[in-house]
Amino acid sequence: MQKEELIHLHMLMVTVKKYYETKTGDAVSTNKYDSLLISPVHIHKNKNSHKEALLTLADEIVERIHEHSRPLQSDYRSKLPTAIAIKQ
């Protein structure tokens, strides 16, 4: 993958984070990502730095989504009907 493509994916991942936060009202903690001190606009940084930042940000977003969705999954199962009606 080219450096330009990684930077583009990096920008898209930042957009995904902002979209998730807007839709859920839930902030994504990005302490690891922030500690890298690199954003998509830092085009002077090398390819590996952008790759590490992209993967770190993606990991933190996925962690937050999993934390947020676990209660929903268990709650969802309790609302399922016990019997299924079949129309003949």
Image (tube, grey):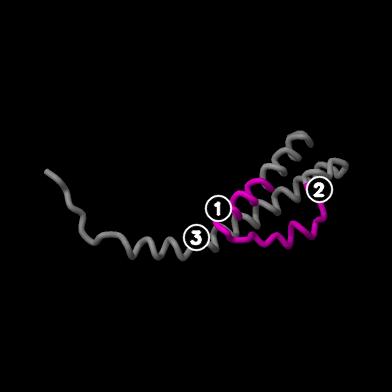
> Decide: marks 1, 3 in contact (CB < 8 A)?
no
Q: Nearer the viewer, residue 47 or 61?
A: 61
| Figure quadrant of the N terminus | top right
State the residue position of label 1: 23
At x 64% / y 51%, what residue is drawn?
18
State the residue position of label 3: 69
Q: Nearer the viewer, mark 1 or mark 3?
A: 1
Q: Which mark is residue 49?
A: 2
**x and y percentages locating residue 78 in the rendered image:** 33, 65
Task: Calculate the distance from the C-alpha at mark 2 to the C-alpha at mark 1.
Answer: 29 Å
Q: Earlier in the sequence, mark 2 or mark 1?
A: 1
At x 41% / y 65%, what residue is drawn?
74
**x and y percentages locating residue 67 in the rendered image:** 55, 63
Q: Secondary structure at mark 3?
A: helix
- Magenta residues: mostly which secondary structure? helix
Density class for disc 1 (Cα within 10 Å; few <14, some 14-19, many ≥20) is: few
Q: Is residue 30 left or right of residue 67?
A: right
Amino acid type shown at disc 3: Ser
Q: Nearer the viewer, residue 22 or 35?
A: 22
- The relative height of residue 71 versus residue 20 in the rendered view (above or below) is below
Amino acid type shown at disc 1: Lys
The residue lying furthest to the left in this view is: 88
| Figure quadrant of the C terminus | top left
At x 85% / y 43%, what residue is drawn?
46
**x and y percentages locating residue 24 in the rendered image:** 55, 56
Magenta-highlighted residues: 14-39
At x 79% / y 60%, what residue is drawn?
35
Q: Earlier in the sequence, mark 1 or mark 3?
A: 1
Task: Calculate the distance from the C-alpha at mark 1 to the C-alpha at mark 3.
Answer: 14 Å
Q: Is residue 80 magenta?
A: no
